[in-house]
Image (cartoon, helix red, strand yellow):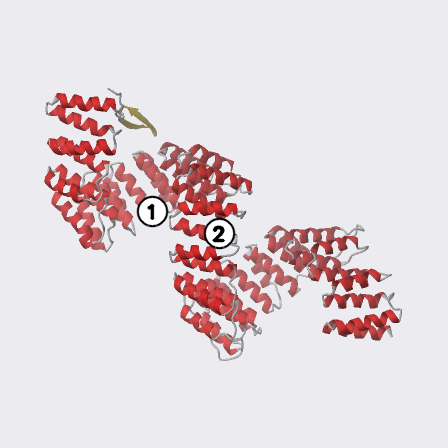
Amino acid sequence: MERNLVNVLQECITKKALLTGKVIHARTLRLRLFSDTFLSNHLIELYSNCHDIASAYHVFDKTPHKNIFSWNAILAAFCKTNNFQRASRLFLQMPQRNAVSFNTLISTMLRCGYPRQALDTYYSMILHDHHGLPVKPSHITFASVFSASAALLDAHSGRTNHALVVKVGLDSNIYVVNTLLTMYAKCGLHGDALRVFRDIPDPNGVTFTTMMVGLAQMNQVKEALELFRLMLRKGIRLDSVSLSSVLGVCAKGGPGRRDVEVDLSDHHCHGLSSKVHGRQIHALSVKLGFEKDLHLSNSLLDMYAKAGDMDSAEKVFVNLNQHSVVSWNIMIAGYGNRCNSEKAAEYLQRMQCCGYEPDDVTYINMLAACVKSGDVKTGRQIFDCMPCPSLTSWNAILSAYNQSADHKEAVRLFRKMQFQYQHPDRTTLAIILSSCAELGLLDAGKQVHAASQKFGFYDDVYVASSLINVYSKCGEMQLSNHVFSKLPELDVVCWTLMLAGFSINSLDQHALLFFKHMRQYGFFPSEFSFATIVSSCAKLSSLFQGQQIHAQITKDGFLNDIFVGSSLIEMYCKCGDVHGARCFFDMMPCKNTVTWNEMIHGYAKNGYGHEALCLYNDMISSGEKPDDITFVAVLTACSHSALIDEGLEIFNAMSQKFEVVPKLDHYTCIIDCLSRAARFHEVEIILDSMPCKDDAVVWEVVLSSCRIHANLSLAKRAADELYRLDPQNSASYVLLSNMYSSLGRWDEAHVVRDLMSDNRVRKDPGYSRSECKNDMQMILENEQ
């Protein structure tokens, strides 16, 4: 009788027939078979499979003679509902445990997001149970352990247990090997993964798929596609998962990895080239009958979208029998990547009209689309419509304001974020610190620094780099150095930011010393490090130091870097070695506008006007388009070399030929050029017509030339403007006073000197630098 009831119960368990099972349960009670442990265990399993946990526990509680199977059955019941806390308490109450008990709890911990606890339970399993005896792990145990190690990126634990797998003879178990491959791939140990894969005697489709995904994660797209080809050669049957994975590989490769030739002459598709194109995989999936598989269709959408082929993505989307939120999200992200926020917004509207509720990914994709399209206003509207923005959404909108240089709004939004009790992450802090740096908000930067300490980012290099940047730009190099010195681990970015901080605060001697320390500690400078330190040498006019850095740049292989090269040209020119700068300029394999500008400006500052003009013409002939900085450089050259007509011609060509609107610097240069030649009538015409008259530099240039050419009327006008615009600038008083003195008008000169005294204006002392045996000294002139 009991045997028949057990058989019927087993059928009920298989079919999840709860009602029939309850009838059998009632019959066992009438027959007084409730003390039959074997029968009770089946009843617990039945109620567990049918999600009636209360009934399962009732049967367990009433079973008089519980065995290990009874305990495992009720433990599995609680684990199926992910009731981790109750399952853990039950596990501790068990009088004895076996591998099934441990496997059940470990897999539940992993599923509930507790990989560290899962590993701890596993180690207690192999060391001893509560009776002090170890429990031998099974292939299921090791599969869970490797999954936990992968989740924690704990390569040490993974490798240790790999050795144990080999020891117990499970290294050929395909289930264990597949999770082992996943673990090595997620930990970035792709060499280990490849060695494991090569040792598998008979890999299956899951093995190949796992290995392909692992190779794609480290951007070895070609090798991943070669593995797919090997999979086909071995005749392993393809399913929708393997095809989705290889489409993910194609998407990872991007537009440059899309060439393929696939022979679809038979079911297994033997004969693939090394570069498998997504279109051929698409054709293969249709041939194998997977065109209605939603997961595979979404992979096709993703592949086409990431390749930038939105027309093909549209065709796949339109032909889908059913859509999911994922399908809509992929299309919105695809158009966002193409900087087409209007089309992305259209898909969002269609998605809502079709009854699909946007999720957090939808809003993030839409935000990203607006940011990439430069439509921050629409992005903010999307953000404000979100009922409960996630941290990723906050970061996206903050980044949008940061990238569009609306730093004030970024700071305001960050404060709003704090009022909504949304904790920032390292990305949030880096974004807001960047905005504080651009605005020069020292106090706000200190507040964010305090918040980073509160949230546990005190030793985060990413956040520390941003802190160094904000303190440096606010002129607080002591605070920058404090942050730098407290970091347990440094990287080249931190060193480079410190160098940049010293440079922008005119502490160039400190920068050189810091660069020396950087080398001594074994850090290899990046191209940005070299560009910064070369700039410091330029500002110090230290040719010897600059040449040493140049030699190091050559040794480290950054000589062809265009930014480093531009810095070297600037350094040689500022140190007066224009010939050396031109030789280096001519040897550069590629040049950009910045490079041309530096060389033209170098000629200009050193009085080589004709050479600067020739180089400007060479730039035009090479096809490089001049920008506003180019015109400042060449107009400066014309001014310093008395090339007045050439300067006027270039000034007029700016807007007429090159569509560059003249700015204040350009007006200053052309006024200086005309003033030096005493063409003051033309100067006054430009002064009256220029849009930006309220600038002290322009009037100082005019006043200086008037003194040389004794144009007293215009000098008075320039001096009056300077008194209004910059009353504490000593230059205007000294120039006008000297002009009166040179003309013998001593009374007017004394009036100007008295006005200077009444306004408490002091003349800044001049200084000079001297370099002796690598030691730079500054000598101030005595004030008279």
The residue at which mark 1 appears reads as: 563
Q: Is residue 683 above or below residue 745?
A: below
Q: Which amino acid is tagged 1?
A: Phe
Q: Secondary structure at mark 2?
A: helix
Q: Which amino acid is tagged 2?
A: Trp
On the image, the x and y values in percent for residue 620 come to 21, 53
Q: Is residue 584 left or right of residue 90?
A: left
Question: Does label 2 or label 1 sit earlier along the sequence?
Answer: 2
On the image, the x and y values in percent for residue 128 come to 76, 51
Disc 2 and disc 1: Cα gap in Å? 34 Å
Q: Is residue 170 above or below residue 130?
A: below
One can see residue 679 in this view: no
Q: Is residue 109 above or below residue 456?
A: below
Name the residue nearer the viewer: 313 or 601: 313
The residue at which mark 2 appears reads as: 394
Image quadrant assignment for residue 573: top left
Q: Is residue 166 left or right of residue 346?
A: right
One can see residue 400 in this view: yes
Q: Which residue ends up furthest to the bottom in the rendered image?
A: 265
On the image, the x and y values in percent for residue 62 come to 84, 62
Residue at point 41% right, 47% down? 409
Q: Which residue ends up furthest to the top in the rendered image?
A: 784
On the image, the x and y values in percent for residue 601 come to 23, 43
